[in-house]
Image: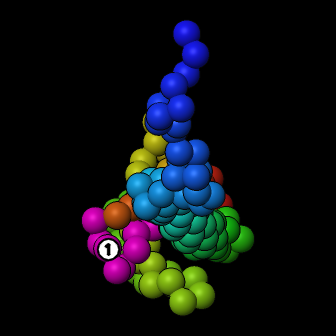
Amino acid sequence: MHPTPYARKPRTSHLRWMSGFTLLEVLVALVIVGTALAASLRAVGSLTQNSSDLRAAMMATWSAENRLTQIRLAHEWPAIGKREFACPQGELPFRCDEQILSTPNPSFRRVEVSVMDERSPGRKIITLSQVVPNAL
């Protein structure tokens, strides 16, 4: 069979593909990029929080070590009991709780120094302990 002269030919001029992206493709790409940016901002925020927590822990350790060193260097024989005092480091307002406990050997006492952040009183940052000999 031969094509008839009146047969319709498909119009190729209207079937050209247009270059570029559809609106749906652009919106999907924006959602993906937005999600990635939100995740990276959350990660950076978490790193910043961890950094400030580590700094506070380091400064609290210094406060506790300062008190324990003071006892050791002064050859103190602290009385059994408990006391609180301010022990700030830099701009961080810390409060130290010192507890003196007896040991099975009466020539020694155990000193525990706990450091809390005064801005959040229920949060104990660190507790250090040391055994102190009687200096007689």
Q: Closest to the observer: 42 or 123?
A: 42
Q: Is residue 30 magenta?
A: no
Does residue 43 appear in this view?
Answer: no
Q: Residue furthest right?
A: 73
Label 1 secondary element: loop
Q: Is residue 120 magenta?
A: yes
Which residue is labeled 1 in the image?
A: 120
Part of the protein shown in magenta? 114-122
- Judged left or right of residue 12, residue 82 is left
**Residue found 46% across the figure and 42% down from its top:** 103
- In the picture shown, does residue 50 fall above or below 110? below
Quadrant position of the N terminus in the picture: top right
- In the picture shown, does residue 74 fall above or below 106? below
- In the picture shown, does residue 3 fall above or below 35? above
Q: Position of residue 95 (x, y in %)?
A: 41, 77
Give the image quarter of residue 124: bottom left
Q: Position of residue 13 (x, y in %)?
A: 58, 52
- In the picture shown, does residue 28 fall above or below 74? above
Q: Closest to the observer: 32 or 70?
A: 32
Q: Residue furthest bottom?
A: 91
Q: Closest to the observer: 92 or 37?
A: 37
Residue type of the residue flagged with mark 1: Ser
Quadrant position of the C terminus in the picture: bottom right
